[in-house]
Image (tube, rainbow, N blue to C red):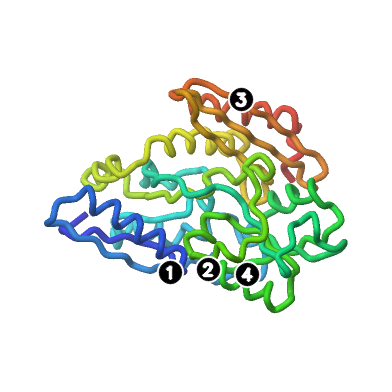
Amino acid sequence: MKSNKIIIGSRGSKLALIYAERAKAEILKICDDKKDAEIKCITTKGDTLLDKRLSEYGGKGLFCKKIEEELLEKKIDVAVHALKDMPFQETEGLITNCFLKRNDPREVFISKENKKIENLNTNATVGTSSLRREFQLKKIRNDLNYKMIRGNIDTRIKKLNDNLYDAIILSYAGIKSLNLNKKISQTFSTSQIIPSAGQGVIALQCRKDDKDIIKILNKVNHQTTYNCILAERNVLKTLEGDCETAVGAFAKIEDEKIYLEAELFSIDGKQRFYYKAFKDINCSIELGKEVGEILKKESKNSYKR
C-alpha cells in the first residue's frame, strides 16, 4: 500500500461488485478516517470464455489469475474473490488469510412453472456448470437431462426464460445478494446437496510482504468462517482436487466442536464416497486432512482421470 488509498481489485460482474463493496465497507470500518478505498474492475478469462466447462480451459484459476497478476504488480492492494472459485494452492508471493462472514452456503433450484426437482417431467433439461452439482442432483433424479451452462446469474436466468433449460441450480448466496429470492423454486439443505468447499464465502487476498494490509485484514477476518474454511479447504488440498473433482465439503461449529461433512464422486459419477467427522474447534486443519485421506483411500483415486 503506497498511499492512504487502498485499491481493491474485483471482477466486474454485478455480483462480484456487490461482494467488493461489502469488502470495502469492512476494510474501512477498521481503518482510520485518513484512509480511503477504491474498487478497480478487472476482467478475467473466466468471464470471457463461456462456451465450455472451466476444466477445458485450465480450471478455477481463470477467475483469479488476472486479479492476482495485478496484485503482484502492485496495481491493487487487495483482491476480492468468491472462495469457491479459487484453487487450493496459494499463488507464490500472495496470502489469503481473510474471510468475511459466510453468506448462506446452500444451493437453490430455479425452474419454469416453479416446480421442485421431484416434480419435473422425465428428460427435463437442468443446467449446471458443475459436475459436483450434476452428480448430486442425479441422486435425487437420474432420469433428467443435465446440460452444461455458463455465464453470470442474470445470463443463466435469461437462458432459462428463453426455454433453453427447464431448470437451473445456483448458489443461494448469489441469488440472495442480487435480491432474486422470489425466483427460487426449491432450497436444498447442506445435507441434501453438500456445497463446494468455501461456498458462500468472500475471500480477501493480498501480498505476503504487505504488512500494513495484512494487519488490516487480520482485523477484518471472521474467525468462525475462517475455522470452517480451514477444514473444508484441507479436504480439497488432501485430494489435490481440481475443476473436474466432484467433491462437496461443508463445516459448521457447534458447542466448541467443528463438524465436517464431505462427499466425493468417481469421475463418471457412478460411485459416491461419504464421510462425516468432528474435532475440537482448534483442530480444523487436522479434521480436513483426516476426512480427505479417508475419502481418497475409499475412492482408490477413482475421482481422477
**Pointer 4 or 2: first along the chain:** 2
Left or right of residue 274, residue 225 in this image: left
In this orientation, does residue 148 appear? no
Dots 1 and 2: beta carbons under 8 Å?
yes
**Pointer 4 or 1: first along the chain:** 1
Of the two numbered discs 4 and 2 in the rendering, the one whose residue sits closer to the viewer: 4
Res. 12 mark: 1
Q: The residue tagged with tag 3: helix, strand or loop?
A: strand
Which residue is labeled 3 in the image?
Answer: 277
For label 1, count other residues whose C-alpha is less than 10 Å away and answer few (under 14), some (14-19) or many (20+).
some
Is the N terminus in the top left, top right, bottom left or bottom right quadrant?
Answer: bottom left
Whole-percent x, y for residue 65 in the image:
46, 58
Whole-percent x, y for residue 290 in the image:
59, 25
Q: CA distance from mark 1 to mark 2?
A: 9 Å
**Pointer 3 or 2: first along the chain:** 2
Question: Which residue reaches farthest left?
Answer: 34
Which residue is labeled 2 in the image?
Answer: 47
Q: The residue tagged with tag 4: helix, strand or loop?
A: helix
Q: CA distance from mark 3 to mark 2?
A: 37 Å
Q: Is residue 68 above or below residue 258?
A: below
For label 4, count other residues whose C-alpha is less than 10 Å away and answer few (under 14), some (14-19) or many (20+).
many
Q: Amino acid at mark 3?
A: Ala
